[in-house]
Image (cartoon, helix red, strand yellow):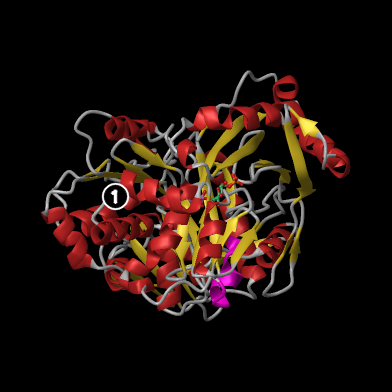
Amino acid sequence: MSIITVETTPIEGQKPGTSGLRKKTHVFMGPHYLENFVEAIWAAIGGAEGKTFVLGGDGRYFNDRAAQVILRMAAASGARKVIVGQNALLSTPAASNLIRQRKTDGGIILSASHNPGGPDEDFGVKFNTPNGGPAPEDVTNRIFEATRRLTAYRILETQDADLSRVGFSKLGAMEVEVVDPVDAYRVLMERLFDFPAIRALFAGGFRVHFDAMHAVTGPYAKAILERALGAPPGSVVNARPLPDFGGGHPDPNPVWAGELMERMMGEGAPDFGAASDGDGDRNMIVGRGIYVTPSDSLAVLAANAHLAPGYAGGLKGVARSMPTSRAVDRVAEALGIPCYETPTGWKFFGNLLDAGRATLCGEESAGTGSDHVREKDGLWAVLLWLNILAVRKQSVAEVMAEHWRAHGRNYYTRHDYEAVDAAVAQGLMDDLAARLPGLAGTEVEGLRIAAADDFAYADPVDGSRTEHQGIRIELEGGGRIVYRLSGTGTVGATLRVYLEAVETDPARLALDPAAALAGVIRAADALAGIAARTGRAGPDVTT
Ligand code: VG1
Ligand code: CO
């Protein structure tokens, strides 16, 4: 067993995006690609010497090989210990929990989250800091800087570590602890939620249907929903993590979780449906005959969290990403707590959670979470919903109807234009940005623009400033259009257009969302010339 030093040269484009570095799998498998990035992580945090890390991933193709490489590099660079999920599996929230609970120096998560997996699809690596959260911008900038001046990395020449059995072993001088990926996470959930109440709900015949989409949440959902809470076997489907996620997109939205949607809207639908994404940090909530938008879900969770034991003391504040609908803002106002608006990406919530300013956070992309970890957490959201339903003894549809009556309804949809030519997408954004100063007070498709800006965020905790986080068009009457380019795609550019209309008239709370939003959608296209510029008749994905 010897440490070898491999000479390398910088590889272009290793810049982490919204959530870590994501590339085509074959790119990651190319010579030195993974190794360079990992070495840059060590460089950005002052070396790996003497440190303890958490390591695991969502089980996608190359997850197992990448884990072995990272273990050998950690050992060669003098790390003291790596805590690895069995078979190199860990959901993102479970990894966040372990990083915090075991007081480690951070962790590496192997995932491209909702992006498909396989040799021709996507792979990703994210680094989380000792607070358990995604590396903030200053750290990701340091990682990127380091990738640009690498000359060598160190790696141990040895056999693979056995990750198939829980227990301790050595890799060179470094300790490897293989842990059950679910155990510590389940204990945390038991502390936050009223398990006996949820168990009683299930025992009373309430039926739950959870689609793990062949991704990492399967083992977690089986262990918690079926074994700990007594949901009948088969309540969790597609529960075995597969390297290609069964050929699907592990993205919990009405398009990619179409099967679940059909079941929940059909005859004899279960009471509650849910799905999660590749790495288990997102969730989709569906009641019998009713889809809950992630923005609404955040608002409902904020309004009802006190019904779960872990949040019985109330919330210190809430935070949402800028494109997320403003439904939660009105809940915060009613509760008399602060509401923060941050750029897209969980890394921007970390400071607010650490400083105790926010308890609950959420994004329109189906991410919700709280200060129990520093990541969004899919199964957590499902359990909080179940806890709320167990206490309120109402259906999802009844909870939603009451919520809208009390707070009004934000009709909401997101249109994604995928794999658009990068220059065309950038041109659209740049031209829009140039017109911003003159937009307020003008009309588009009969809607009056109240304000328009290029969103910038000043972090209230550390004062850091992040610019160009999306173009915000505020309409009179509370509606909004937001345009931004995705930071997680791997082909061309993805233009995301977020559309919102507010309704407080009690007679107009149950409209078809597409009809309620038709005017805003027309205005969004007219304002930016989407169809004309992209040549697309409509979005590729509507959520
Ligand atoms: C997307 C979502 C964003 C989310 C990010 C990572 O980013 O819009 O809300 O935080 O994915 O989620 P973008 O830049 O493509 O819009 V995950 O579950 O991929 O870690
Ligand atoms: Co994810």
Q: Can residue 112 be seen in this view?
A: no
Residue 19: give x, y in percent of width and height: 58, 54
Front in this rendered view, residue 228 or 84: 228
Q: Main secondary structure of the magenta part?
A: helix
Q: Relative to residue 470, is residue 188 drawn left or right? A: left
Q: In which quarter of the image is the N terminus?
A: bottom left
Front in this rendered view, residue 434 or 246: 434
Query: Measuring 33% from the left and 54% from the top, which residue is drawn there?
Result: 382
Q: Does the residue labelled 1 lie within 8 Å of ligand 2?
A: no
Q: Relative to residue 154, is residue 156 drawn left or right? A: left
Q: Relative to residue 323, is residue 268 drawn left or right? A: left
**Is residue 63 within the magenta segment?**
no
Query: Measuring 59% from the left and 39% from the top, which residue is drawn there?
Result: 501
Residue 190: give x, y in percent of width and height: 27, 70
Residue 375: give x, y in percent of width and height: 48, 62
Q: How crowded is mark 1: few (under 14 residues within 10 Å), some or many (20 or more)?
A: many
Residue 250: give x, y in percent of width and height: 41, 40
Segment colored magenta: 347-357
Q: Is residue 456 visible?
A: yes
Q: Relative to 346, is 283 above or below? A: above
Front in this rendered view, residue 378 or 215: 378
**Residue that badge 1 annotates:** 218
Secondary structure type for disc 1: helix
Q: Relative to 520, is 397 above or below? A: below
